[in-house]
Image: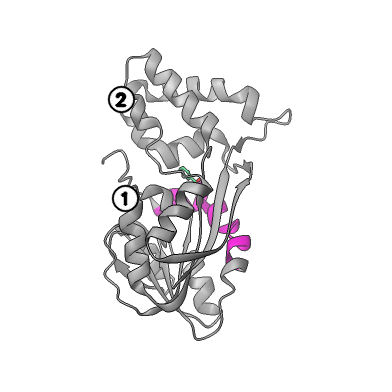
Amino acid sequence: MSAIHQTWDAADYAANGRFVSDLAADVLQWLAPRPGERILDLGCGDGVIAQRLARAGCQVVGVDTDAAMLDAARARGVTVVRASGEDLPFEREFDAVFSNAALHWMRQARAVLEGVHRALRPGGRFVAEMGGHGNVAAVITAMRAVARHRGADESLAGPWFFPTEEAYGEMLRQAGFKVRRMALIPRPTPLPGGMSAWLKTFRGVFFAQFGEDAPVVLAEVEDLLRPVLCDARGQWSADYVRLRLEAVKE
Ligand code: BEZ
């Protein structure tokens, strides 16, 4: 498993990551899907949102790299294609490309945007939400601090792509899009399973480097974060910052 090519366990994700699709209402409102539209769900994961779009009457194709997540999406009746978002195999066939909480895993952002542009018919829209600049900054800093103290690989703490509005807007324009709207939105997000479950689900690659010491390292990271991300009632949140956008293929 490389730093960025995390693999997923569909049951673990359902227990500790379901809030990701549950919190997609705002970006879905920006998508405003219409029955009959052909929509590509880029980074569809376990297919919960794609299924919702299909039930709204859209013709949906989900694309992802993770075999376990694609199996879960197929089990929901979603049509899926296994492909990298950095090398999308579609040509002028979608009315919209949608993506929720997936683009920050794809570090070759220019290749992603070129593929999205290619996949859309002229006038088609790209509506997405991803981690934006400053996303999970405290979480990454705590992991880096612990790794540095132990002489471990701190680059494994935060391999994601969290761009500013300005930087991503420029990339969209260079790829041939007109940006209709874009916003950077701080959204502290309650974590149903607490911080340790989030860390294990979303950054297991970082903790794996510590072998049998991983549980101790996890506790150290959690201790550093408790004063800023756990409230007096013991409810943990992650310091999420969302970058939401709607752009059109000119
Ligand atoms: C996010 O949705 O912002 C996110 C999820 C997992 C790891 C990092 C960021």
Q: Do the residues labelled 2 and 1 touch (CB within 8 Å)?
A: no
Ligand 1: does it lie within 8 Å of the C-beta at label 2? no
Q: Name the residue under label 1.
A: 108
Q: What residue type is labelled 2?
A: Gly
x then y, percent, for residue 199: 47, 35
Q: Is the magenta stretch mostly helix, strand or loop?
A: helix
Q: Which amino acid does label 1 sit on?
A: Gln
Residue at the image point whose x is 30% and y is 73% from the top: 90
Asked if the stretch drawn in magenta spans residue 11, the answer is: yes
Q: What stretch is highlighted in magenta?
A: 10-28
Residue at the image point whose x is 51% and y is 33% from the top: 196
x then y, percent, for residue 23: 60, 56
Ligand 1: does it lie within 8 Å of the C-beta at label 1? no
x then y, percent, for residue 95: 45, 78
Residue 31: name its quadrant: bottom right
Residue at the image point whose x is 34% and y is 36% from the top: 205
Q: Which of 164 and 130 is in front in this view?
A: 164
Residue 181: name its quadrant: bottom right
x then y, percent, for residue 107: 34, 47
